[in-house]
Image: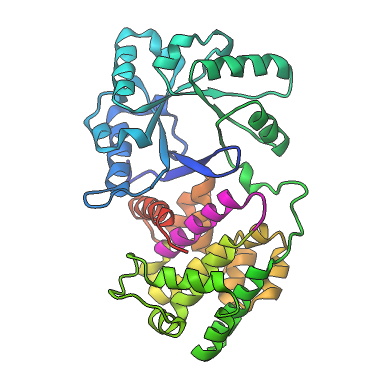
Amino acid sequence: MHQTQFLVREPLLDPQQRVVGYELCWQHLDAAAYTQAELEDLVSFVAAEVCDEERGWLLRDKKLFMQAVPAMLSIDALYSLPPEHTVLSIRTSELANADTLAAVQALRAGGVGILLREADLPRVGSRLGTIASYVEVRFSGADVASQARTYAALKQANLRMVGRPVTTWADFDACAALGLDAFVGKLHLTPRPGTDGAGLNPAQTIILQLMQMVNANADIAQLESVLKRDAALSYKLLRYINSAGFGVGREIQSLKQAITLLGYQPLYRWLTLLLATASTSGYSPVLLETAVVRGRLAELLGQAALGKAEAENIFVAGMFSLLDRLLGISMKEVLETIQLSEEVQQALLTRGGKYGPYLALAEACELNSNLVASLAASLNLSPAEINKAHLSALAWTQNIAT
C-alpha cells in the first residue's frame, strides 16, 4: 500500500492547542474496506520509519492514532510499535464479537491505547473504562447540559474524550470547558477571531534583522554584534551549535566561532525556525509544528530534483507559508518585512515557480486533498518516496533544537 497509496495525517490537539499525536491513514480509504495485508502494511511501514534500533521512538511524546478493524488486531506488525505511543481506533459495535473483545482486552492489557468510535455515549458503561482508553465524541451546540453530564460520566470511567469534528473555535472552547482531552481536525488552519494584528515582538525584530544581514552577506563581526544585544538568542545559538545533533565534538563558547562553524545558509535556516518559535500568538504551538513539518517535508521532496542548496530554500518557503498566521500579520506584510528571493515569494503567493509545487504537495498531505496524486505525478515522485519523506519530516520536527 505504501507504494501505491498516499499517507495523510491529522493532528490531535489538547485544549492548549498543542499537538499530542497524529492520526495516520491511507488517503481516501475507509478502514472498514482495508484488507488485512493493507492494514499490516500501514502499521509495518509506519513502524519502520518512526522506530530506530538505536534511538528508539522518533516522535518523542507524540502518539499515533490508526483506525483498526478486527482483522488488524492480531497482526505481527503491531509488536513493532511501542504500545505506550500507539492508539488503535475501532467501532464500538465490533466489541459485540467475543473474539474481537478478547483481542482488544489483550492489547489494552499490553499497554496499547484503544479508542472507541461510534459509541452510544449515554449508554457507555463504566466497564468500558477497563477496555478502552479513549472514546470519540461529537459535540453539538444543542442540549449542552445533557452533553456535560455524559462527558462527566466518561471522565468517571477513566475514558479520555476525543472530539471529532470540532469545526469552529467557539465549539473548541466549549469542548475544552466541558473537559474534552483532544480534538481531531484542521481547525488550526482557520484564523481564530481576535488574534490578528499581533505584529512583531522584540525578539522577532532582532531575528529578522539578522536574517536580512545574512542575506546581505554581512561580516561575522556585524552579526556577532547584533546577537550580543539579545542574551537569550545568543544562548540558543550556542546551545544549538553544542547540541549532540550538530556534532561539533568540542564545546563552542564564542558567538564568532558558532557563526563560522554553522555557515550562513544553515544560520539562515536556523533563524527561520527561531522566528516562528518566538511567536507569542495564542495558537502558535500547533501552527509552529505544522509549519516545521511542512517546510521539512517540502524540502525532502525537492532534494533529489533540485539539490540540497535549492531544497534549503524550499524549507524556508514552507516555514514562511504559515508565518503570516504565526506573526499575526498579512503575507504581504511578511514579504515587505524581509527580503526573500523571487522564487520563494512566488511559491508563497501562488505556489508557482520551482519551489511552489513542492510546497503545495506538502500542504496537500495535511489536507487529504485530491491534489496529492496529481502533484506527485507532475513532480515525478512516487507514493513510497512521499510517504517516507512524510514520516521522516514528522520525526525530524520532534527532534529539532532551537
Q: Is residue 246 magenta?
A: no
Colour mapping used in the image: rainbow
Residue shown at 46% from the left, 40% from the top? 21
Q: In the displayed structure, does residue 1 sit left or right of residue 344?
A: left
Coordinates of residue 247 in the picture (x, y in percent): 30, 70
Q: In the displayed structure, does residue 157 sit left or right of residue 54?
A: right
Count all numbered tags in the image, as a single digit.
Answer: 0
Q: Is residue 291 magenta?
A: yes
User: Toward the viewer: 374 or 401?
Assistant: 401
| Residue 58 seen | yes
User: Toward the viewer: 179 or 101?
Assistant: 179
340 in relation to 65, above or below: below
Q: Quadrant of residue 122?
A: top right
User: Toward the viewer: 295 or 348?
Assistant: 295
The residues colored magenta run 280-300
| Residue 353 seen | no
The rendered magenta stretch, by its main secondary structure, is classed as helix
Coordinates of residue 148 in the picture (x, y in percent): 66, 18
Q: Quadrant of residue 68?
A: top left
Coordinates of residue 399 in the picture (x, y in percent): 40, 56
380 in relation to 260, above or below: above
Residue shown at 21% from the left, 49% from the top? 53
Coordinates of residue 24 in the picture (x, y in percent): 43, 39
Q: In what quadrant of the picture does the N terminus appear?
A: top left
